Each structure stands twice: as C-alpha cells, then as structure tokens.
Amino acid sequence: IAALGIKIGKGCTYHGLALNVNMDLQPFLQINPCGYQGLRTIDMRLAGVTIAAHDMRFNLVHKLGQALIANQRV
C-alpha cells in the first residue's frame, strides 16, 4: 500500500513516499514490485479503507509531522 524510497548518490540524498489510496492497479500487473515475481500491488480501497485522497494526504502529513517532531534530538 505504501513505499518509502531513499537513495544517496554523488553527495546528495533523494527520498520519496508513495501511498496507494484508490487507483488503477492494472499497470502494476506488468512489473515485479520490489523485485518479487507474483507480488500483487494493492491500494487502501482494496484493503477496505474508504477515504478521499485529499483527506488521506492531510492525515499522512499531519501524522508524519507529529512523529518527526516527537523523535527530534536536542
């Protein structure tokens, strides 16, 4: 349902976050997710979660921000 990617190269860090809320999963049938043959990609809708994408975006940013603040080192 979610993927987090981190890459470090040439002195730079790159990161990304993907969350499948309610999408067309047909294109994912053509790849091996995370290199695993036969692994199926799902979204939150297929897992039984119904939420609008903009609501999920707000909740994700809010919760992630809270977690990062709670884990700050002084």
Image: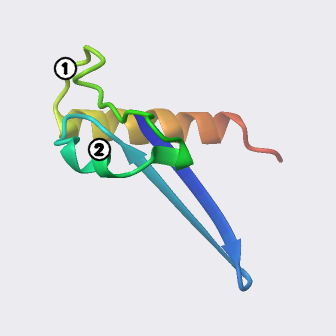
Tell me what residue is drawn at x 38 percent, y 51 percent: 31
Q: Earlier in the sequence, mark 2 or mark 1?
A: 2
Residue type, label 2: Leu
> Would residue 35 be found to the left or right of residue 19 on screen?
right
Residue 29 has which mark?
2
Q: Which residue lies at the image location 67% right of the left edge and 33% below the top edge?
A: 70
How crowded is the residue under tag 2: few (<14 C-alpha within 10 Å), some, or many (20+)?
A: few
Label 2 – label 1 distance at C-alpha: 23 Å
Residue 65: image location, x then y, percent = 52, 41
Q: Vertical placement of 53 versus 4: above or below? A: above
Residue where numbered disc 1 is placed: 50
x and y percentages locating residue 12 in the rendered image: 67, 79
Q: Secondary structure at mark 2?
A: helix
Question: Which residue corresponds to the image point at 49% horizontal and 58% vertical from the top-left?
Answer: 16
Quarter-wise, where is residue 23 in the image? top left
The residue type indicated by label 1 comes to Thr
Closest to the camera, between mark 2 and mark 1, is: 2
Write down the quadrant of residue 29 in the picture: top left
